[in-house]
Image (tube, grey):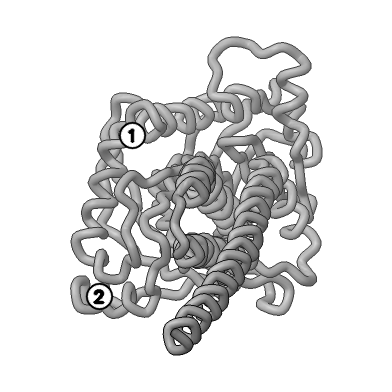
Amino acid sequence: MGQRQPHVHRASVIAMRLVDIADTIDLTGVEALWARHARTLAARSRLITTSPKAMTFGVPPVELVLEPVEVVVGNRPMQAAAMVRFYEFGVAAFSLRVQADDLPWVEFSARVNAMDAALGIASGSEVWNRLIAQISEVLTPAFVRPSTAPLHEDYLLGLVHSLEGVSGTATLHKDLDLVPLLSGESRALSEQAAQDLLRQRYAYYTDDLVILTWDRAFIVEPRDDSDVLDVLEVANAQLLELRYYDELLDAELPRMYDLIEATRNVANPFAARRYADLARRLYTLVAEVTEVTEKVDNALQVTEDVYLARVYTAALDLFRVPHVSKAVDRKLAIIRGSYSALYEEASSKRGELLELAIIALIVVEIVIAVVHHV
């Protein structure tokens, strides 16, 4: 008898959409509003398999279980379990999960790609927008300065709990054709491209595996669930929020230059006030962005769990989070420098104004003395 073809006994496909829904989110307010609306308590998320001493959320996000959503996956209507997590720094992370049990490997891989086709950027906005509208209707009072044109990030995960017909996770990439699942491509990739897709592989036990790409991940986890999902969600949330502030500062810098130029071109003895007002505005912007980016940086605190720390660091590097963070820091440094220059300019203008006032007083005193003498 020939070897049985690889078969997935228990698995799910999870689509995530993370949305920058507000500047910040009042998590306590979310809990209270949801309790009144749904008459169920929200939960503060925690990592399942990892000790709190090893890795923990900086500020635990609030997790809400939503009503199931019908999704057409590969021309087949399916019920998807829906949930959302709210992060203090303004991100709402939605996820839809469909079961993919008892499927040959090829069909499981096709299910993952069909989920992407149903909920990806090109075709899935309607489903996600309905979910956003559903929670916004109830929770908007807890959103501080809601976003008018929110950014988003999508991520797709194939999560397998039970897999038959492979020799082990160490050689899984040799036993299975993982390329279609990880790339979403139906055409064969070059050897170099295929190797690049499989480069980010991580395992802790002999029966688990994580393979990361820019927009997808494949996870083998024989236990009920995996903290890797949470780690990847946090990394995507950090990327999204830093992207938002990178674009915000991109738009702010030209306006800042124009305001500085306009202020300098005003021939006004009271220009010191203009410089001071502009400096205060820039200082406020720097303070707000710095406060939020610090919360983003501390979204997940890693101490002892070396395996999850490796996966988390790899995800951050793969998503180019450090690169975007450095770009934000560079732009903040430019604004800080402009603030310092404006503050010095304001001080200089105040000094000039004081000198003029002293000279005017001296002239007035001389005129009064001359008038009295005459």
Task: Give the quarter of the figure containing the C terminus.
Answer: bottom left
Amino acid type of the residue tagged 1 in the rendering: Gly
Name which of mark 2 and mark 1 comes first in the sequence. Answer: 2
Q: Residue 169 lies in what quarter of the image?
A: top right
Residue picked out by circle 1? 124
The residue under the point 41% across, 74% down is 43
Q: Nearer the viewer, residue 236 or 345?
A: 345
Q: Residue 57 lies in what quarter of the image?
A: bottom right
Q: Nearer the viewer, residue 182 or 367?
A: 367
Q: Nearer the viewer, mark 2 or mark 1?
A: 2
Q: Residue 27 lies in what quarter of the image?
A: bottom left
The residue under the point 49% across, 86% down is 369
Say above or below: 2 vs 341: above
Instruction: Give coordinates of residue 123: x percent, y percent.
Output: 33, 28
In the rendered view, does 50 fall on the left or right side of 247?
A: right
The image's mark for residue 26 is none
Task: Give the quarter of the figure containing the N terminus.
Answer: top right
Is label 1 in a helix, a strand or a loop? loop
Residue picked out by circle 2? 33
Amino acid type of the residue tagged 2 in the rendering: Leu
Q: Does residue 11 appear in this view?
A: no
Is label 2 in a helix, a strand or a loop? helix
In the rendered view, does 83 fall on the left or right side of 157?
A: left
Label 1 Cα neighbours within 10 Å, binned few <14 / some 14-19 / many ≥20: some
In the rendered view, does 40 fall on the left or right side of 173?
A: left
The residue under the point 53% across, 44% down is 257
The residue under the point 48% across, 88% down is 373
Instruction: Give coordinates of residue 46: x percent, y percent.
Output: 55, 72
Instruction: Give coordinates of residue 171: x percent, y percent.
Output: 79, 34
